[in-house]
Image (cartoon, grey):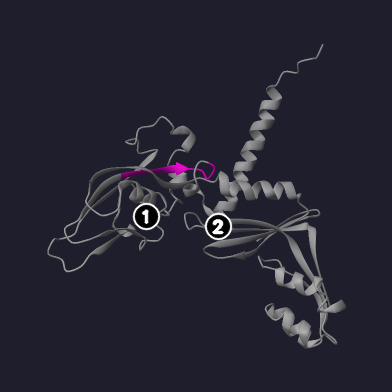
Amino acid sequence: MANKDNNRKVEITALNETSITVYMEGYRLALANAIRRIVLSDVPTLAVDFAYFYDNSTGVPDEIIAHRLGLIVLDSLEAIRKLRPPEECREASEKDESCYVEILLNKEHPQEAESGIYVLAEELSFSHPYVKPVYPKTPIVYLAPGQKIYLVAYARLGRGREHGKWMPASASILQYLPVVEFDGEGASSECLECISAYRDLAKRMARGEKGVIEYKRNINTSGLLYCYESGVCGDKLKLRYDENRLLLTVESTGALPPEIIVEEAINTLKTRVTRVLEELDKAVVVEKR
């Protein structure tokens, strides 16, 4: 996928179930960084907000179990379309199904059991059929023989700036595009050993090739930077970072697909800018005396 506008260019250079890398050329750093920050702070996801405990004979306090419930990653793809945004649910009751998802856990382990069991996220019951734990084997609490846990929790949409449990991404990284210029002819064995972790580059230099490599994916270039700045490769290796070309990498927690996270972040930024422009149109200029 690519989008071009004169000297501007956008490409998705890497995409899988958990991460995405977007290559941006000709865009200001401030704009790309705004998207990066919104990914973490303002893209809504679903998470447990609070819980009522009716029975808990385990060795774990209610507060600890509630904390664990809040950190269970919930599939939020349908929720962000069907539930009302958090700003509209501040005064809502937990019985409001347009704002809250009810979660039930009622588990008792028989007294005659020979050993204890772990209660897993897959054993939670949800009032909305499109909600489920992304990682169903997530342990919640351990039940010894004769112990019981009975609680009702409520999940809602929230944003990362409110609490980390609502952050849709575990990482949101913005970096300049790394550009490597190399000449393998006459490269020393020390140089080839230094860059050995970068296999494509190492193979080409070992064959005596000469060229340029642009890393349009999220890659740790600190090793290359050391090989360049330490002088171990002499003039056979040069590394620079192109400030006019940017890489945005987002790693999803699993609550939302990574491409949806980026799309929602961009839409949020557009909405904010539009709102500011509308307010400016209504603003009254007050002359200073």
Residue furthest to the left in view is 112
Q: Is residue 52 left or right of residue 88?
A: left
In the displayed structure, does residue 83 sit left or right of residue 168? left
Image quadrant of residue 240?
bottom right
Give coordinates of residue 66: x percent, y percent: 35, 48
Picture mark count:
2
Q: Are marks 2 and 1 in contact (CB under 8 Å)?
A: no
The reply to whether the magenta stretch includes residue 8 is no
Q: Quadrant of the N terminus?
A: bottom right
Disc 1: CA contacts within 10 A as few (<14), some (14-19) or many (>=20): some
Q: Residue at x 46, y 45 (%)?
A: 81
Looking at the image, residue 205 sits to the left or right of residue 172; the answer is: right
Q: Is residue 127 visible?
A: no
Amino acid of disc 1: Lys
Left/right of residue 36 with respect to residue 119 in the rendered view: right
Element under disc 2: helix
The kind of residue tagged 2 is Pro
Can you give x and y, in whole percent of width and height, for residue 243 in the image?
79, 57
- In the image, 273 versus 53, the foreground residue is 53
Can the viewer see residue 49?
A: yes
What segment carries the magenta color? 153-161
Q: Which residue in the structure is indicated by mark 1? A: 132
Cα–Cα gap, marks 2 and 1: 18 Å
Which corner quadrant of the image does residue 193 belong to? bottom right
Q: Secondary structure at mark 1?
A: loop
Q: What x and y, as percent, mark residue 288?
A: 80, 14
Q: Which circle marks residue 72 in the picture?
A: none
Q: Which mark is residue 258?
A: 2
Label 2, residues with CA under 10 Å away: few <14, some 14-19, many ≥20: many
